[in-house]
Image (cartoon, helix red, strand yellow):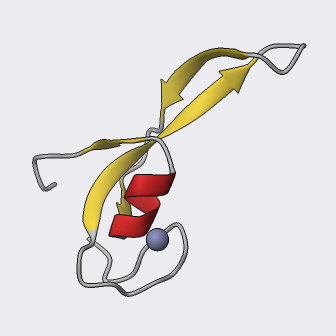
């Protein structure tokens, strides 16, 4: 687990391990589903509020 947010680079006190959720859009740029990232990332509290993600409860 990193000591900085992998999304914005902040070194906030409330970092957590997450998997980013990518939103898939179709040819008309309409949301068509979502896909879970293959990689674990460390995110600050602000990024966890701002961007779609799934919390990783078990530490690797
Ligand atoms: Zn962040």
Which residue is drawn at the image coordinates 47% and 38% (left, top)? Answer: 37
Q: Quadrant of the C terminus?
A: bottom left
Q: Residue 41: x percent and y percent?
A: 39, 59
Q: Is residue 24 above or below residue 32?
A: below
Q: Is residue 2 above or below residue 29?
A: below
Picture quadrant of residue 11: bottom left
Which residue is drawn at the image coordinates 89% and 14% (left, top)? Answer: 28
Q: Residue 8: x percent and y percent?
A: 55, 74
Which residue is drawn at the image coordinates 39% and 56% (left, top)? Answer: 48
Residue at the right extreme, as displayed? 28
Q: Nearer the viewer, residue 36 or 23?
A: 23
Left or right: 25, with 2 as reference point = right
Q: Is residue 33 above or below residue 44?
A: above
Picture quadrant of residue 12: bottom left
Picture quadrant of residue 54: top left
Left or right: 12, with 13 as reference point = right
């Amino acid at each position: 687990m990193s000591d900085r947010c992998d999304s914005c680079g902040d070194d906030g006190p409330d970092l957590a391990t997450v998997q980013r959720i990518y939103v898939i859009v179709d040819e008309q740029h309409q949301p068509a589903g979502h896909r879970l990232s293959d990689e674990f990332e460390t995110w600050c509290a602000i990024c966890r509020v701002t961007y779609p993600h799934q919390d990783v409860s078990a530490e690797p």
